[in-house]
Amino acid sequence: MNNIKHIVIGVLTLILVQGCGVYSFSGTNISADTKTFQVNFFQNQSPRIFPGADQTFTNQLQDLILNQTNLDLVTSGGDIVYEGEIVQDYVAPNTATSDITAAQNRLTIAVNMRFYDAKDPTQDMEQRFSFFFDYPASSSENNVRDEALQIIFERITQDMFNATLARW
């Protein structure tokens, strides 16, 4: 009777360990044989070019993947590859005042991304991601641009991560 009890406990423990093995605390859905990733430079091809925005975006995407996966960053031959370009960067009035002037402006940035998975080409995709930042019209864009880029790029990179590695 004691041996049966130990066998049942051993089988239940084995089932629990196996069941927990496929869960990822980061929410990623990466095959076990994928070990490396590569982020090619996302060049700014929007009509408005601000120096450094492309490098900032590329670095933020690399940092996000490094922090949320156990993949190694490589400069070539990655198991998964991100590439693309910043295709849109514009400011437009968002809300108006009673005397028909802008009360708030909206900075919108869009990024076109291509994703390649060498281990599973069925996951390859191309998609456009965009986000915005609203700021008072009384503020100069130059005064809020760094904060705006941080917020916009954080959202776009997270959306890209979710679409490609978390598969949300």
Image: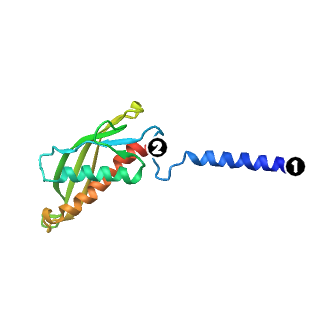
Find residue 53 and name its label. Answer: none
- Report helix, strand or loop for mark 1: loop
Q: Residue at (77%, 47%) from the top-left corner?
A: 8
Q: For numbered disc 2, what is the local secondary structure?
A: loop
Q: Residue 59 appears at what percent x and percent y?
A: 26, 52
The residue lying furthest to the right in this view is 1
Outermost top residue: 121
Judge the density around disc 2: few (<14), some (14-19), many (≥20) Cα neighbours within 10 Å. some
Picture quadrant where residue 85 is located: top left
Rendered image: mark on residue 29: 2
**Residue at the disc numbered 1:** 1
- Report the amino acid beneath label 1: Met
**Quick one: 114 or 137, which is closer to the camera?**
114
**Within-10-Å neighbours for mark 1: few <14, some 14–19, many 20+:** few
Give the quarter of the image for residue 114: top left
Q: Position of residue 128 (x, y in %)?
A: 28, 42
Which amino acid is tagged 2? Asn
Estimate the x, y position of residue 166 in percent, counting from the top left. 43, 46
- Asked if residue 80 shows in the view, the reply is yes
Give the colouring mode of the picture: rainbow
If you read the primary sequence from the N terminus, does the residue marked by circle 2 or circle 1 appear first? 1
Q: Is any part of residue 100 visible from this angle? A: no
Residue 62 locus on image (x, y percent)? 31, 49
